[in-house]
Image: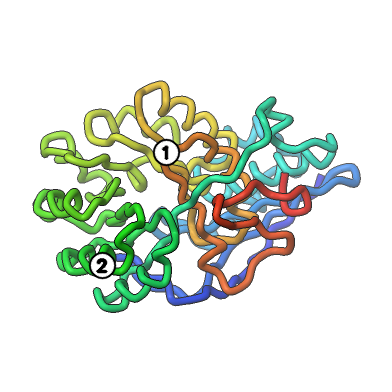
Amino acid sequence: MTITVEQDVFRLAEVFTISRGSRTEAKVLTVRIARDGAAGWGECVPYARYDETLESVTAQIEGLPADVTRGALYDLLEPGAARNAVDCALWDLEAKAAGKRVWELLDRPAPGPCVTAFTLSLDTPEKMQQAAARHAHRPLLKIKLGTPDDMARLEAVRAGAPDSRIIVDANEGWTAEVYSDLAPHLLRLGVAMVEQPLPAGQDDMLGEIARPLPVCADESCHDTASLPALKGKYDMVNIKLDKTGGLTEALRLNEAARAEGYEVMVGCMVGSSLAMAPATIVAQGSEIVDLDGPLLLAEDRDAPLTFDAAGVHPPQAALWG
């Protein structure tokens, strides 16, 4: 078996801004694993917030034994981008070798399309209103916020897209006081959920202040080991394969979170259709799906995911799985 990893860059359709900064391209790692004439691949997005770089994640992957299995992988790598790309490539390899789809290997029904959020990046209220108006036909919009001056942005987006369902992602950018002040206005403007309002590790106040609308853990939730610390503070968890370290753990987290009473959001980093493809399996039945990465790109993989009025569709075999 051979494992190779290379860097790929995808131009974004527009500058993408969150509370931590802006970008004009998505830099990803593509892992290919070949064995006995079959080949599988996967993609990850190293994330600086989790002390990951393209170089550090590449080194993790290149340090794996050539004959690594999905079971052994979980003893060799921590949850994160490196494990995700390898885990997904191994799933793809197994499916290709068996001549089956991944959901068949999992003994699950074929996945269907899921309505996905479309993300509006952080900008001036005027520009966010214009962006909301351009995408007002979409049923679910996600707003990137996380500054002390977000009230005007909220009002502007609602004015631009009066009929869309709205969720808000603060990316750890608020304090408990700011969130408490904003919460009544979030309700007034019809916001359905707020994602990670406080910094991970500084979110105990969520267990003490009122949560008038559902609060979703993103940076505070990586894998099943994260769940005990969320109790009493969050109502929903955001499952991202680059955090869980692959499809295998994402499915485990989904089941464990459900068992503990959490609703589930399935999200993504900004990557290509290859990164989203395995997540479409986890997304089945989720309360919120946010797999819009390819919609933010100016270019994508061959055989990309299909997005239409029904949402994001599962991948063709030519792409993954």
Q: Position of residue 18 (x, y in %)?
A: 34, 66
The tag on residue 287 is: 1
Q: Is residue 169 above or below residue 124?
A: above
Screen quadrant of the C terminus: top right
Task: Residue 83: name its quadrant.
Answer: top right
- The mark closer to the camera, 2 or 1, is 2
Name the residue rendered at 26%, 78% in the picture: 126
Q: Is residue 24 left or right of residue 234?
A: right
The answer to whether residue 315 is visible is yes
Q: Position of residue 250 (x, y in %)?
A: 52, 36
Between residue 14 and residue 159, name the one nearer to us: 159
Amino acid of disc 2: Ala
- Asked if the residue at tag 1 contacts the one at tag 2, i.e. Cβ–Cβ closer than 8 Å, the answer is no
Q: Is residue 237 above or below residue 178?
A: above
In the image as oriented, which residue stretches furthest toward the top?
259
Q: Position of residue 138 (x, y in %)?
A: 44, 59
Amino acid of disc 1: Glu
Q: Residues within 10 Å of mark 1 (few under 14, many from 20)?
A: few
Screen quadrant of the N terminus: top right
Task: Residue 106: name its quadrant.
Answer: top right
Disc 2, SS? helix
Q: Is residue 164 left or right of residue 185?
A: right
Q: Is residue 7 above or below residue 72?
A: below
On the image, numbered disc 2 is attached to which residue? 159
The tag on residue 154 is: none
Name the residue rendered at 16%, 52% in the picture: 188
Between residue 222 and residue 160, name the one nearer to us: 160
